[in-house]
Amino acid sequence: MTTFDFLLQGMLVAAQPMNLFYALIGVTLGTAVGVLPGIGPALTVALLLPVTYRLDPGGSLIMFAGIYYGGMYGGSTTSILLNTPGESASIVTALEGNKMARKGRGGPALATAAIGSFVAGLIATLGLAFIAPFVVKLALVFGPREYFALMVLAFVTVSSAFGDSTLRGLTSLFIGFALAIIGIDQLTGQARMSFGIPDLLDGIEVTTLAVAMFAIGESLYIAAQGDQGPDKIEAVKGSVWMTGQDWARSWKAWLRGTAIGFPIGAMPAGGAEIGTFLSYATEKRLSKHPEEFGHGAIEGVAGPEAANNASAAGTLVPLLTLGLPTTATAAIMLAGFQQYGLQPGPLLFATNPQLVWGLIASLLIANFMLLVLNLPLVGLWVKLLTIPKPWLYAGILLFATLGTIGANPSVFELGMLLAFGVLGYGMRIFGYPIAPVVVGLILGPLAEQQLRRALAISQGDVTVLFTSPVAAVLLAVAAAALIVPLILRARGRGQVLSQLAANED
Amino acid sequence: MSKGNTPSTQTRRPDRAALVIAVFLAGLAGLIFWDTSRLAKITSYSGIGPATIPFVIASVLLLLAAWTVFEALRGDFPTRERQEFGPVIWIVGGLAVQMLTLKPLGFSIATGLLFAATAAGFGKRKLWFTIPIGIVLCLGVWLVFAGLLQLSLPAGPLEHLFW
Amino acid sequence: MKQFFLASILAGALALPAVAADYTIIAPANPGGGWDQTARSIQSVMQAEGISGNVQVQNVPGAGGTIGLAQFASQSAGNANALIVGGYVMVGAILTNKSPVSLNDVTPIARLTGEYEAIVVPADSPLKSMGDLVEALKKDPGAVSWGGGSAGGTDHIAVGLIAKAAGVDPTKINYIAFSGGGEALAAILGSQVTAGISGYGEFESQIKAGTLRLLAMSSPERLPGIDAPTIKEGGLDVVVENWRMVAAAPGLTDEQKAAVSADIEKLAKSAGWQETLKTKGWTDTYLAGDAFKAQLAKDVSATEAVLKDIGLVQ
């Protein structure tokens, strides 16, 4: 049988009414748990995996795929509506998505996220099916020095989330770096900045920081405005659905996000967040409406959401072809696969084609069911914003702490949540951007470790960082992205500055 | 924060709060230097030990502190909106109470108190009304997420009545 | 509506006959890792075999399991329904993190599973045997980079023991710690490092596909189905086993201890557990009672010695 026949056969099995029903349940359960801030897809899948054990293998595989996609998607809803990213990969979504929701455009934001996730999931799953062996070869070229170059590129792109002051943007980023030092140093096992407190040895949980800075900091800031602020956010202004212009601005962003997210997800140390950062920076640079960025640009939701979902499918490339779980979610999926007698590895596609194609078909069906479940819900979700402020924010804090407690029920973790919430509030008062802190916490340790690994392998020879072709290209792109705007600004100083000044009013 | 970025006038006096931020940044840098200096003697084949990168970060933080002082003296910081601290105290207090009562009283009561405190911060001060609502709501949440979905949320006297 | 949906599905799924003691198992790690999987496997087998009616798994991640261990020792004292999963990695973590709570502060019940370390090189490596690798190590320890899991973990300890046995200064090894086996495997496959070391299961499918060459195993004797010599055969007296165990709370009465031990024995001997071991590819190394205690004491002292040699513990 050819690849295509296997896929077709898998689709026929997966499309039986009972299996569609299982997919719907899986997607519903996954979304319900994944929507909690602080509970990412890894914990969602781990918690719900036992539910699938009680079904026949086909049904349980398909329900499992549904839970996975539901858990992945759940985080973006709270990001957009409540400015509370559910996991690190949906932090960027909050930047533009929440601004849109505030302007009464929550409906289109949710819709572009859902459809973008679907498109990205569809393309990336097909990519998994047909070009996985090729992609994985590419991913293995990446060693520590190439990753270090990729991190440098990611740092440069972060500057697009700096806001209007370089000083305050850099300060936020370096506060994130400082927080990232906390914990055991990966390479030597030494404790840094932990002051003998065991709870600090593992460092600061990204989700704790993100939930605290975004959800709690924001609640405090809005409460502190007292009666000055608007009492209710206008939930729907214009259409709750995407307009023709929304579509026109979204579809390219979806495709670009997929193209960025899929290969980065396939890299063993890539991670979903990095794809979302790069996608956001790309959209900002290519957009015809750069002035809308920071005030609710739809491309800034469409691109990163697609990148996020594409990289989730990308993670399956090394998992299925090499047996390489590269994220916590993938590790749990591996455990799940083993339950179905699927032994991921280089021989999997040859020895067990039915199961692999069954899985891929299940993923496609689950992806579709996610859209079926979520598009009709958009109108309902948006109504959440019409809840009067006292109840809305009380509910936000209820679910924000629920997520943190559920992931790690420790008083210390709640204390950190409170402390970072107050920090986030203080930073908002003085106009410091929040996202760079979280980005610094994510990227800082990755960059440090990869740099040190690269130099340890070369025994201290710094030139290796530039001599690999991939690393050299990435560094050159990063340098260009940093320098070109500076030159342009210097050359057209008067004209650009006056334009900037005009924009600021 | 997006609303607070109107550039201030040049005639403003040095911004005291911004100077406090500079002191905080310098203090953070000092803390990093102090904590990681004991690791400076550990080196490996990479030539970069566990203290190298923290030193770099701390040095940049010092530079940023100096830059902040400079901008504070020039009055370059954005004007800030008036903050009411009553609501902030309500919410911070609610989070603190939740933290302290979570283990002894269980998820529902602790989080119910947080719920009521937050509502109070936003103007609903009728605690006799909001606390019971919060606790009942949280109990419902607990039953769904801990009871059915097996999330481990601390149980207290109230939860033990049901499970 | 959604709640109703959830409730009806799950109520059906979870309606189990209430039988014996309820257990709460602490998995002192994040979801997805070995300890978490062990805890969740115990959970499902105990419920399926009717050993316990209701088993909860709670993740308390952090610092090589020492945070979970400390919380367990202080909060569960005297509670016969509380269990914690742990393993060899914890022994090292307690030492490197200077944890105030050690395995003496809980009641180890039994070792359940174990895995031996495999030493591999990429298929196109010029190193053909363990002997070649040891020669290279003796010639220039810095030029041999080892890819493995976290610093001070089982993989690192095994490399330290190999260097020491080969007469090379253990502080001179060029060990590159990766977060998790997956990232290390990618670095080995991409020939970023000279050699790789990790649990056999991590490499199994690559070895079978011929993309990695297995040089040696850290087992005391050759293992069935694995075509490689032991490190011992090459003249280096190194045996390392990464085992996982289950422990009960401190301060239990003898009757309580016996009851928990009996439940765990029932678990280990059950058909469901054997089936789980097979699907997960874990080796059954069940060991309980005094024999386990003696083994544990031996491991702790040997680990402390090698961590001092590597320079991770002063």
Image (cartoon, coloured by chain):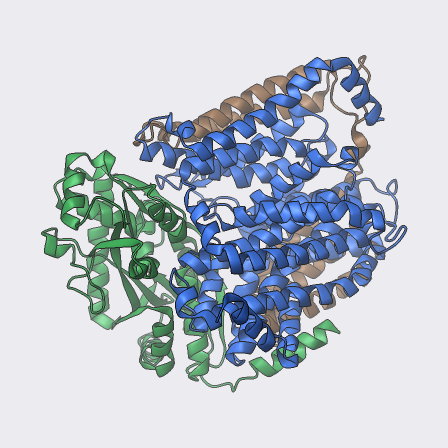
Chain colours: A blue, B brown, C green
> Where residue A107 sits in the image (x, y, percent)?
81, 54
Position of B74 with respect to A45 (left or right) is right
> Where residue A112 sits in the image (x, y, percent)?
74, 53
> Where residue B112 sits in the image (x, y, percent)?
71, 61
Q: Is residue C166 above or below residue A345?
A: above
Q: Is residue A342 above or below residue C238?
A: below
Of C276 and A302, nearer the camera is: A302
Q: Within the image, what quadrant is residue A386 found in?
A: bottom right
**Residue B157 can be seen, yes or no:** yes
**Residue sitting at x 39%, y 69%:** A351
> Where residue A250 sits in the image (x, y, percent)?
75, 47
Position of A261 with respect to A379 (left or right) is left
Q: Within the image, what quadrant is residue B64 found in?
A: top right
Which residue reaches farthest right? A238
Position of C187 with respect to C225 (left or right) is right
**Residue sitting at x 63%, y 18%:** B67
Which residue reaches farthest left? C235
Position of A331 with respect to C108 (left or right) is right
Which residue reaches farthest front? A2
Count the marks: 0
Of C247 and A468, nearer the camera is: A468
**Residue A408 can be seen, yes or no:** no
Of A241 and A3, nearer the camera is: A3
